[in-house]
Image (cartoon, coloured by chain):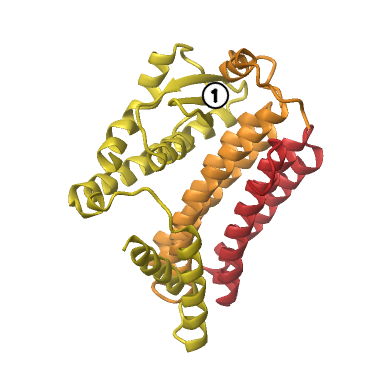
Amino acid sequence: MLRVLYFIVSYIFWLLMTLSLEWDRLAAGAVVCLLTTMIFGKTSIQKHKLLQPQRYCWAAYYVFLLLWECLKANLDVAYRVLHPAMPIHPGIVKVRTSLKSDLARTSLANSITMTPGTLSVDVTDDGYLYIHWINVKTQDVEEASQKIVVVFEKILKRIFE
Amino acid sequence: MNDYIGLVFIFIGVLFELFGCIGLLRLPDMYNRLQAATKCVTLGTCGIMFGIFLMQGFNEIGVKALVAVPLIFITSPTAAHALARGAHIAGVRLWQKSVCDRYEDDKKHMGKEKPAP
Amino acid sequence: MDQIILGCVAALVAICFMCLYRAWRGPTVADRMVAIDILGILVVGFCALWAVYTERGFLMDIALAWLLLSFIGTITLAKYLGGQQLDE
C-alpha cells in the first residue's frame, strides 16, 4: 500500500523534472519509478501517522523556522569571515538526543548543519551526536544539548513520533 | 514587478556565495571551511533558483528551478555530514588552536581508532 | 535586465575560480574534496543563470543532472575516505 504512494510521489517528481507530455518520456518515467519503488520501497513509517493532519501543520512551521535559522547562520558566517581578526574558537562537542527513529535523527542532523555555527559530524546508535561548533561556549553534554538540539527536537518529536 | 523581486533574490544569492567562498579561502582548517562554505552556498543557490522562478513564472525553466530548491536543501547538508565524518576517520586533524575534540577522545577510549588509509 | 544577469554570471565565474584555487592549493585531500563539492553546487547556479540569459531550456536539465551527480560523487568519495567498502 505504501509502495503505491511512493510510486505516485516519485512519478510526480519525474513529471516536474521532465515537464513534457510525450508518450515516450511518460513510459520511461513509469519504468524508472517502478524499478525505484521495487528496490528502495522498504521503510519503517507507520501508516496511521500519515493520516494525522497536525503533523503536516508542524512540518510547515518547521520549514519556516529552519529558513529563519538558515538566514541567521549565513549572516553569522558573513560576520566571522569578514571580521579582520576572525573570532572563532572551534571544537567538537558531544550532545544527546532523545529521538528514536532514523528519519527523525537524519532531519535533526541536517537541521543542525544549517543552524548558526554548527556542523554534525557523527551519530552513534545510543543517541549521541558529535557536533563541530565554530564558537564553543560549553563542553558539557547537557548544556550543549540545551543550546543546540532542544529547539528542533521539540518540533521533530511532534512531527515524527 | 516580479522581475525586480527576482533580481533582488539573485543578487542576494550571489552575495552569499561570495561570502562562502571567502570563508573557503580564509578559514584555517577543513571543518571550518566546510561549515562556512556549505551554509552560504546552499542558501545562495536556493536564492538564485527562487529568483529565477519569480522571473520566469510557470514555464519550462521556472518549474525546474523550483524543483531544484528542495533538492539542494536536502542533498547539500548530507554531503557535508558525510565529508566531515570521512575526513575525521581518515585522520584529518583539527586546527591547533581548537578548544576540544570529544570525538577523538571517545574514539581512543573505545579503542577503535582506524589507521589512516 | 540582461546586463545585470550577465554581471551575476561573471561574478559566479570569479567565485568558481576562488573555489578552484582552494582545490589547487588545499593542504590535504579533504580540503580538495570540500572545494570540489562546493564547486558542483556553484556550477548548478551558473547553469541556471545561463539558461535564463540565453533562454535555452535544456541548460536547466544539465543543472539538475549535475546537482544529483555531484551529490552521489561526494558521498562515494567520502565513504572511500572513511575507509569503508563501496558496496556497503
Q: Residue at x 40, y 68 (%)?
A: A7
Kindly identify which chain the residue marked by label 1 belongs to.
A
Tell me where residue C84 appears, x and y as whole percent. 68, 39
In the displayed orientation, state which residue is furthest to the bottom: A23
Tell me where residue B98 appears, x and y as whole percent. 62, 16
How many C-alpha atoms fall within 10 Å of the one at disc 1: few (<14), some, or many (≥20)?
A: many
- Tell me the orange chain: B
- Tell me the yellow chain: A
Q: Residue at x 71, y 45 (%)?
A: C18
- A8 or C47, which is in the foreground? A8
In the picture of the structure, the residue carrying the numbered disc 1 is A134
- C20 or A113, which is in the foreground? A113
Label 1: element kind: loop
Tell me, yes or no, if residue B67 can be seen here: yes
Q: Residue at x 31, y 38 (%)?
A: A156
- The three-letter code of the residue at mark 1 reads Ile
Tell me where residue A90 appears, x and y as whole percent. 58, 20
Residue B89 in the figure: left or right of residue B55? right
Q: Residue C21: name its quadrant.
A: top right
The hue of chain C in the figure is red
Residue A15 in the figure: left or right of residue B82? left
